[in-house]
Image (cartoon, rainbow, N blue to C red):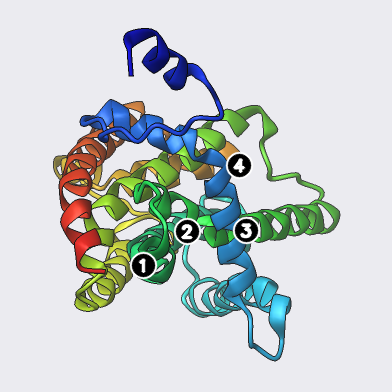
Amino acid sequence: MDASREELALTDPRVWVIQPRREGITARLRDVWRYRRLIRFLAFKSIAKLYQGTALGWIWIFIRPLFPLVVNALVFGRMLGVGSHGVPYFLFLVAGTLIWELFESSVMWGTRSLQLNRGFMSRIYIPRLIMPVASMAPAYINMLISLAVLFIAAVYYKITTGTMFLTPAHAGWALLAVVLAAYLSIAISLWTSVPALHVRDVRFTVGYVMGFWVFLTPVLYPISVPPRYQWLVALNPMAAIVNAFKYGVLGIDVLSRRDLVIAVMISTVVFVSGLLFFSRAEATAADKI
């Protein structure tokens, strides 16, 4: 093929040219954008399959986020009398649980993403990087349910106490917290999804880590530490993210911009290093599917 015909083939949309995959982080991120429609398809597929074969079906979407909220509200709010910075404890709990569950569920689904889509990947080629992103869709559905619970509870307390505890003026901080929680969950999933494809222990280990991590984060109760230990709290990026979300929706907790910057830096280090690891490991992992 001469140069003119080769150039025509490359620009003709009817011609599919097979080329070597470009290397580098930018190329991986460009692939995610190119396959964004497939991400939507896989996201809807993961949501549809979530409760297939269950007797209650889609009702589980509402039961799963509500049941732990009720239990924790009774234990920590009523029985233990945990403080909540002047707002009803249930609102404090829902706000903290909402952003934490978004993070935890996203990490768990992202960790299992390659294993759950093993059959799909064995039939056609798609960038494996889109799998952790698409598989996190159920976590965002639960987040929307929790947002509805938060709004309904705020209206109830407005009627009963005369005070509206939601703070729309700070909503930008809440949105930033959601973005950062999603960013950190994707970053961690890049590290865990490839090993979890062949070693089930990874999934169980991540679950145990999350169960311990939540108690180091101001989700169920506010964390107060002496000033000399504040640097330890800053090393937990989810502490700053949860506090930012609570500040955004309820106007409570001290918003530390320094800790938020540190959280962004830690998340970026985990994301970039995880992207390099994922790009190198996915090729070997794909051969073993």
Q: Which disc, if any, is residue 249?
A: 4
**Quarter containing the N terminus:** top left
- Residue 195 place in picture, x, y as percent: 20, 65
Q: Residues within 10 Å of mark 1 (few under 14, many from 20)?
A: many
Residue picked out by circle 1: 112
* Point 24% across, 41% down: residue: 275
**Quarter containing the C terminus:** bottom left
Q: Is residue 33 visible?
A: yes
Determine the CA span between mark 1 and mark 2: 8 Å
CB atoms of marks 2 and 3 within 8 Å: no
Q: Residue furthest front?
A: 1
- Report the side of 60 relative to 278 (left or right): right
Q: Which comes before the other along the chain, label 3 or label 4?
A: 3
Give, as a three-letter code, the residue at label 4: Val
Q: Which disc, if any, is residue 44?
A: 3
Determine the CA span between mark 4 and mark 2: 27 Å
Up-down relation of residue 231 to residue 12 (above or below): below
Q: Residues within 10 Å of mark 3 (few under 14, many from 20)?
A: some
Q: Please state which of the two labelled residues, at mark 4 or mark 2, is closer to the viewer.
A: 2
Q: Splitting the image into 4 quarters, where does residue 220 fall?
A: bottom left
SS at mark 4?
helix
Q: Residue furthest bottom?
A: 55
- Report the side of 53 relative to 12 (left or right): right
SS at mark 2?
loop
Residue picked out by circle 2: 135
CB atoms of marks 3 and 1 within 8 Å: no
- Residue 201 place in picture, x, y as percent: 20, 78
* Point 29% across, 37% down: residue: 263
Determine the CA span between mark 3 and mark 4: 28 Å
Give, as a three-letter code, the residue at label 2: Ser
Q: Please state which of the two labelled residues, at mark 3 or mark 4, is closer to the viewer.
A: 3
